[in-house]
Amino acid sequence: MVGCDKTYIRSPSAILKIGEMVCIAVTFGMFRGVPLTFGDVNKTVGSVGTDADFFAGGVMVAALIISPLFFLLYLFKLANIQQTVLELAINFLFAAFLFICASVCMAFYHSADGYWAEKRSDGITMGIFCYVSAALYTLDSLLACRNYCKVPNESSA
């Protein structure tokens, strides 16, 4: 029978997972809802669908699928992957990719002109949420590293 681990909800890992999901959802909502771009080489009016957009969109969709999946697996005790290298690797990759997305976004909106200059504050906000997401994934990577490298107690062996 599947049970809910109520102690997990109060753990640092759960708090980080919830923060990651919220920040990624806000970033993706701004990206698709406003609509914004992560970088428009030609700086044409309303041109979206650049390589940076596809990269950032793919990273955000992957994060929106994997992070809730991990959260539910831990919450219902369906898999014990917190002590494996899998979570460490995925969190590290998301942190790196989101940092790249945020940097590209901030660089673009720092020098945006024409149509995109009107959306500068929205674009910078999207970049900040990307940076916050990257920071949360970095903290989660450090927590996963601590869990992975933890030496089991001799009494439990």
Image (cartoon, helix red, strand yellow):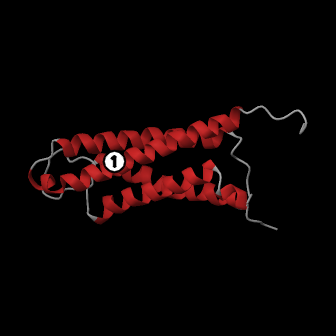
In the rendered image, the residue lying farthest to the front is 10
Q: Is residue 49 above or below residue 82?
A: below
- Residue occupying image coordinates x 64% and y 60%: 72
Residue 25 visible in the picture = yes
Mark 1, Cα crowd under 10 Å, few <14 / some 14-19 / many 20+, is some
Query: What residue is disc 1 on?
Result: 128
Q: Percent x, y for residue 136?
A: 49, 45
Where disc 1 sits, the SS reads helix
- Please state which of residues 93 and 151 is positioned toward the viewer in this rendering: 151
- Specify the quadrant of the image occupied by residue 85: top right
- Apparent side of residue 66 relative to residue 149 in the rendered image (left or right): left
Q: Amino acid at mark 1?
A: Ile
- Specify the quadrant of the image occupied by residue 46: bottom left
- Apparent side of residue 66 relative to residue 24 in the rendered image (left or right): right
- Please state which of residues 41 and 127 is positioned toward the viewer in this rendering: 127
Quarter occupied by the C terminus: top right
- Apparent side of residue 79 relative to residue 69 in the rendered image (left or right): right
Quarter occupied by the N terminus: bottom right
- Residue occupying image coordinates x 51% and y 44%: 137
- Residue occupying image coordinates x 58% and y 36%: 142
- Residue occupying image coordinates x 62% and y 43%: 87
Q: Percent x, y for residue 9?
A: 65, 58
